[in-house]
Amino acid sequence: MVDVTLLGTGGMMPLPYRWLTSLMVRYNGSSLLIDCGEGTQIAMRERGWSPNPIDVICFTHYHADHISGLPGLLLDMANSDRTDPIDIYGPKGLERVVGGLRVIAPELPFEVRLHEFAGPEEIIETHGYRLKAFRVSHSVTCYGYTFEIDRAGRFDKDAALAANIPLKYWSKLQNGETVEDSGVTYTPSMVMGPDRKGIKITYCTDTRPVPVIGENAAGSDLCILEGMYGDPEDEQKALKKKHMTMYEAAQIAADAGVERLWLTHFSPSMGKAARYTSGVKKIFENVLIPDDGETMELNFDE
């Protein structure tokens, strides 16, 4: 099971009813945070959560509304007696930016490990899931992310018995190991069915609609894209500032064949973003324009 929560859905500046951009994904006792705008730790506390289980933080880019909450979050972890290291990933410049922010959070009782992306795509395997970062098109270097959990096929007991595979090796084969015994080699393919559908989440904000988004979002159970503007006349503004409109995001979701779409990163001038829902649904039906704290539980499809 995977929990996905939009802690903050605002862009540019926090509002009384919207915190700035932040997403938390919780899986198997581990928590991943993508972006950490101002107020992120307050949004967590409103949910009754501690930041201590966060193992990985990823940044899309280094505009203030996506990273300015980091020093306070790290201090919050320190005050909660955290000692485990934390891994932080982001575009080139991560060490410089985080180093600058840590002037006000200089002494922490845990190690902060920084990982800068070097190319247009990066793969991160950690805590039982796979993250892929892919570069998009904003006014500064910016990345989107996919979160994926693979799922192996079912173990075929009859196939194992037919192949006379000793019982003591069954669990090893289920775990993907190849076993040799008395000159005989047993491989997982002998007893495992085809891979089953896993779980895939895509998250991408602050970009123009470029093909790489749809390519990486294809088949996602949940796709979270920015919908900075909702008024059709704001299309030129989105083009100039390198953001997306809600309708452009919906078209990406439709073309990519995702299961459901959440929009986020709303302009502070927009007011109540949900009023644009009916127009967006004309392009992609299964869309939600959420408030802060929107949560979804994703389970493996049987």
Image (cartoon, rainbow, N blue to C red):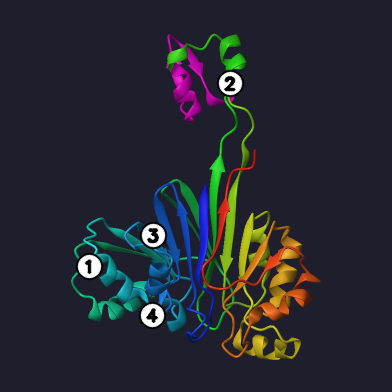
Tell me the mark number nearer the camera, choosing from 2 and 1.
1
Kindly state the secondary structure of the residue where label 1 is placed. helix
Q: Is residue 113 above or below residue 200?
A: below
Left or right, residue 74 beside residue 240? left
192 or 68, which is in the foreground? 68
Q: Neighbour class for label 3 at 10 Å: few (<14), some, many (≥20)?
A: some
The CA span between labels 1 and 4 is 19 Å
Specify start and end residues of the magenta stretch as a single range.
169-190
Tell me the mark number nearer the camera, choosing from 3 and 1.
1
Q: Residue at x 64, y 55 (%)?
A: 220
Q: Is residue 87 above or below residue 127?
A: below
Q: Which residue is mark 3?
A: 56
Which callout, 3 or 2, points at the residue further toward the start of the chain? 3
Which callout, 2 or 1, points at the residue further toward the start of the chain? 1
Tell me the amino acid under the disc marked 3.
Val
Which callout, 3 or 1, points at the residue further toward the start of the chain? 3
Question: Which image quadrant for residue 162?
Answer: top right
The CA span between labels 3 and 1 is 18 Å
Tell me the amino acid under the disc marked 4.
Ser
42 or 247, which is in the foreground? 42
Q: Neighbour class for label 4 at 10 Å: few (<14), some, many (≥20)?
A: many
Task: Tell me, for residue 68, which label it has, or none.
Answer: 4
Please state the horizontal and vertical placement of residue 207, each as a whole percent of the image: 60, 77
Please state the horizontal and vertical placement of residue 227, each as a whole percent of the image: 64, 77
* Visible residue check, residue 116: no
Q: Which residue is mark 2?
A: 190
The CA span between labels 3 and 2 is 36 Å
Quadrant in which the C terminus is drawn: top right
